Image: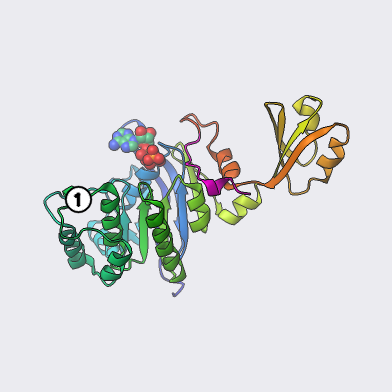
């Protein structure tokens, strides 16, 4: 693509208030072409608000939002942008009195459907049945086919895998991987850390309506350091284990949990003073690292959904 092609998503000082209630505040970031971008944050952080502004469903209080260079507050520009957009909402709702085939015909007429048959094979649904009779998983699969069958340059997804069974989830990750290989852009909100690690190149973390981190998953994990858990015969005060290279010490149930910079020689030296009963050293997991951004907010604690994969080093 030429360097003059506009960024798929650009938010500039975007602010949205619902009356006195803050949705998002001074949100600025750009999603680049070909990126898989994860939009993370605790409940109520403002993710859906930002997504709804991007889709033209809410008007910004201040600032601007654009999709592929088109201003989303301009009706004509928004219509133009939407031809290249696939949207997957978190709560999929269709008009009740139509069949799955009707839904796909409708979107196919609007935007095209080059991948319809192939996607239906991968995400099969009872096409002839009324969508009212669909299970929530089938509704979600139909929404996936509808969102991706025109091979959109940009996909915006609000917690796309919530409610999908593991096999369908895997197929969906495959689809996202294909998009990435083809240089297409994906933007999605998520609470599932294994998914973020597997799928995202870069993440933006928002808390209380503001962006608090924007980096590659790789960099964020690299800065997470090493976690050492030690059980000692003695019980020194936690402060005794605070030395250079230790970012943090927590003491719980007779164990000390230390967040260290990569090197842990200093820890080994220090532990010579004690009797070590047990010790485990591992790379920080994505959960260890991301919880740091979530903790201590005035809107409650962590709400990430942990899966088995998240706890691996
Ligand atoms: N229609 C509305 N009217 C008033 N306040 C709203 C409305 N929609 C959202 N809010 C408020 O805006 C803030 C951001 O909410 P938003 O739904 O964007 O968060 P979120 O990050 O998507 O949360 P979740 O992870 O729970 O979906 C919250 O304080 C919420 O209560």
Residue farthest to the left, as pictured: 97
Residue 45 drawn at (x, y percent): 43, 38
| Residue 285 in picture, x, y percent from top left | 61, 47
Specify the quadrant of the image occupied by residue 78.
bottom left
Rendering coords of residue 112 (x, y %): 23, 69
Q: Which region is colored magenta?
A: 302-313
- Residue, far bottom: 2
**Quadrant of the image containing the N terminus:** bottom left
Q: In the rendered structure, does residue 306 fall within the stretch colored magenta?
A: yes
Q: Which residue is mark 1?
A: 94
Q: Is residue 173 visible?
A: yes
Question: What residue is drawn where x is 84% and y is 32%?
Answer: 275
Position above or below: 185 against 91: below
Query: What residue is shown at x 88% (from left), y 36% (from top)?
Result: 272
Q: Is residue 269 left or right of residue 95?
A: right
Q: On the rendered structure, is 280 left or right of 16?
A: right
Specify whether 181 is left or right of 277. Answer: left
Q: Is residue 269 magenta?
A: no
Q: Main secondary structure of the magenta part?
A: loop
Viewer-closest of 83 and 222: 222
Residue shown at 46% from the left, 72% from the top? 3
Q: Secondary structure at mark 1?
A: loop
Q: Residues within 10 Å of mark 1 (few under 14, many from 20)?
A: some
Ligand 1 closer than 8 Å to label 1 CB? no
Left or right, 53 with reference to 285:
left
Q: Is residue 200 visible?
A: no
Residue closer to the observer: 272 or 233: 233
Q: What percent of the width, then of the height, locates residue 269? A: 87, 40
């Amino acid at each position: 693509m030429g360097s003059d092609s506009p960024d798929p998503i650009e938010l500039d000082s975007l602010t949205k208030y619902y009356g006195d209630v803050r949705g998002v505040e001074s949100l600025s970031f750009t999603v680049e072409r070909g990126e898989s971008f994860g939009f993370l944050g605790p409940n109520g952080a403002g993710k859906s608000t930002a997504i709804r502004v991007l889709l033209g469903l809410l008007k910004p209080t201040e600032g601007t939002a654009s999709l592929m260079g088109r201003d989303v507050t301009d009706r004509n520009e928004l219509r133009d942008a939407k031809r290249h957009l696939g949207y997957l909402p978190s709560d999929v709702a269709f008009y009740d009195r139509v069949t799955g085939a009707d839904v796909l015909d409708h979107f196919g007429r609007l935007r095209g459907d080059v991948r319809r048959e192939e996607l239906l094979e991968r995400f099969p649904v009872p096409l002839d049945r009324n969508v009212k009779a669909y299970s929530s998983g089938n509704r979600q699969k139909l929404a996936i086919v509808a969102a991706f069958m025109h091979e959109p340059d940009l996909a915006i997804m609000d917690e796309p895998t919530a409610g999908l069974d593991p096999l369908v989830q895997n197929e969906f990750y495959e689809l996202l991987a294909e998009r990435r290989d083809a240089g297409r852009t994906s933007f999605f909100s998520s609470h599932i850390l294994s998914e973020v690690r597997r799928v995202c190149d870069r993440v933006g973390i928002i808390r209380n309506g503001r962006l608090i981190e924007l980096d590659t998953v790789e960099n964020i994990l690299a800065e997470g350091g090493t976690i050492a858990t030690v059980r000692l015969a003695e019980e020194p005060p936690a402060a005794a284990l605070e030395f250079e290279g230790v970012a943090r010490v927590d003491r719980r149930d007779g164990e000390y949990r230390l967040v260290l910079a990569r090197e842990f020689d200093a820890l080994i030296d220090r532990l010579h003073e004690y009797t070590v009963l047990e010790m485990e050293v591992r790379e920080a997991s994505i959960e260890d690292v991301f919880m740091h951004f979530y903790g201590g907010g005035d809107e409650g604690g962590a709400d990430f959904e942990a899966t088995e994969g998240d706890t691996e080093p």
